[in-house]
Amino acid sequence: MARWFQMAVLALSLLAMQCSDPVVVPDPYPTAYDGARFDTDLLATQWYECATGCMEQHASIVDPIAARIYAYMGITLYQALVPGMPQYRSLEGIVTGLEGLPFPDTSGNRYHWALAANAAIAELLRQMLPPSEQTRRRIDSLEAANIAQRWLAQLDTAMRERSVRYGRELAARIVAVAGNDGGERAWEKLFPPDYQLPPVPGVWAPTAPDQAPVPLLPQWASVRFLVARDTAIEAPPEYSTDTGSAFFRAAKQVSLRRNTLTEIQLDDARYWADPFGRAPTFPAHLMRIATQLVRSGPYRMGFGAVLYLRLGLAMHDGYVLAWKAKYRYPLLRPETYIRRVLNPAYQAPIPSPPTPEYVSDHALIAAAVIAILQDAFRTPFPEIERITDRTHAVRGMLDRDYRNLEELRADILSAEQLSCTQYDFSIAAGELYGQRLGAEIIETVRMH
């Protein structure tokens, strides 16, 4: 009997390898299901594409809000798979506020961890995205398709129902944790009318007549960090109109750069602007590139789960860090200073974001994300031969090719300079703090 059972398991294993269904047949022990061997391309990347598409339907999902959703998606994906990946540990005690998570009883019960993750992410997105019929249909459709495409789920109804139930319970708990982090339903109050800027020299002012008189999401400076501990940011140079001051020189440098911009440089600036209120957000732009890289090789589910977790945490904590600086030092944008002090007729090449200037959030997020990607896609994983960014193809912009991640990072930071919406000291500070944040998250969330 034991001999027959072993042969049956072997036959099923061979069948699984030969067919297109990527589900790995469980081992003879009913207590384990190897979620770590499930191909990331077939579940995680589909959900990140779905989430990005849903967010793009809502103009109120601005960069920090998008980053928060990605962060909790990463937490949910990873935590749903942890019981099937014994070498990984739970995020309780690592992610601030994350406690009381359900954990499945695997004593005599078989779970399909990919389906648990599928149910968990679907439920999380239903709760965290602005409600709309189109969004719900898109989520429901992908969740159902992922179940239908996995033949083992059809053979074992009890396992399927048990896995889905666990995923939804996990999502409900994570949504509850997210509900008290300070960022809940922030899309309803992007420009709170009761916010008052401090009466200090050089304070932020709207850069266009149609901008709100208050800056974007000042309350985000109080949103909870998820893992970051190194959150100190030095003050920018002191505001001054004195021609010998560091601040004056920084503004003049922006003005001179604007006067010499070529059309090609303007295209570079526009490409990476990802402006407020228009799809995609900057986090979505970077997440699309990350997803392309994940799909470039046969990576295990554990690899993708950790990578998406790290990226989401870096984006979320990066925006909280940037916003804390922006509203502690609510500095005016270069175009405002230049028109007041240097040239009243000055015109910025692209619109400035409706936030205080310091620090550059694009530089901070890009530096953290690229550091995490460089750590993930290194030996023993295949070397990246080329990165093709097609994010803006639907808007008539040409694809962008990069030979490596360092080229990508340099292009983003250069575009931030060419946009003339930031002082050079703000970009340098953002890059520095982003590198620190990326290193901290790499150390905190280990890649196995």
Image (spheres, grey):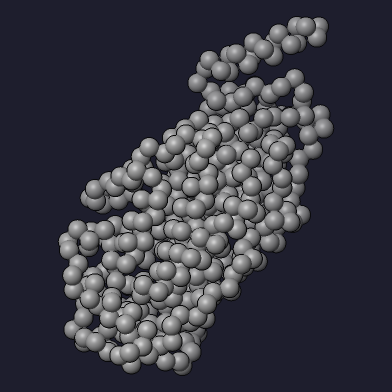
- Residue 332 drawn above or below residue 188: below
Q: Position of residue 273 (x, y in %)?
A: 33, 62
Residue 191, picture quadrant:
bottom left
- Relative side of 1 to 390, left or right: right
- Position of residue 344 relative to residue 264, above or below, is below
Relative depth, front residue between 227 and 377: 377
Quarter occupied by the C terminus: top right
Q: Is residue 407 left or right of residue 83?
A: left
Q: Quadrant of residue 57?
A: bottom left
Q: Residue at x 54, y 68 (%)?
A: 320
Q: State the residue lying farthest toward the front.
A: 244
Q: Residue at x 24, y 72 (%)?
A: 257
Residue 278 visible in the shown view: no
Residue 21 position within the rendered picture, expressed as x and y whole percent measured from the top left: 53, 23
| Residue 177 position within the rendered picture, expressed as x and y whole percent measured from the top left | 67, 60
**315 vs 156, nearest the viewer:** 315
Does residue 5 sit above or below 346 in this rendering?
above
- Location of the N terminus (image quadrant): top right
Compare residues 385 and 35 and report the one nearer the observer: 385
| Residue at the (71%, 47%) spot, across then down | 90
> What x and y, as percent, mark residue 7?
71, 8
Q: How many numbered marks have been drawn onto this rendered protein structure?
A: 0
Q: Is residue 240 visible?
A: yes
Q: Which quadrant holds residue 431?
A: bottom left
Residue at image coords 80%, 9%:
2
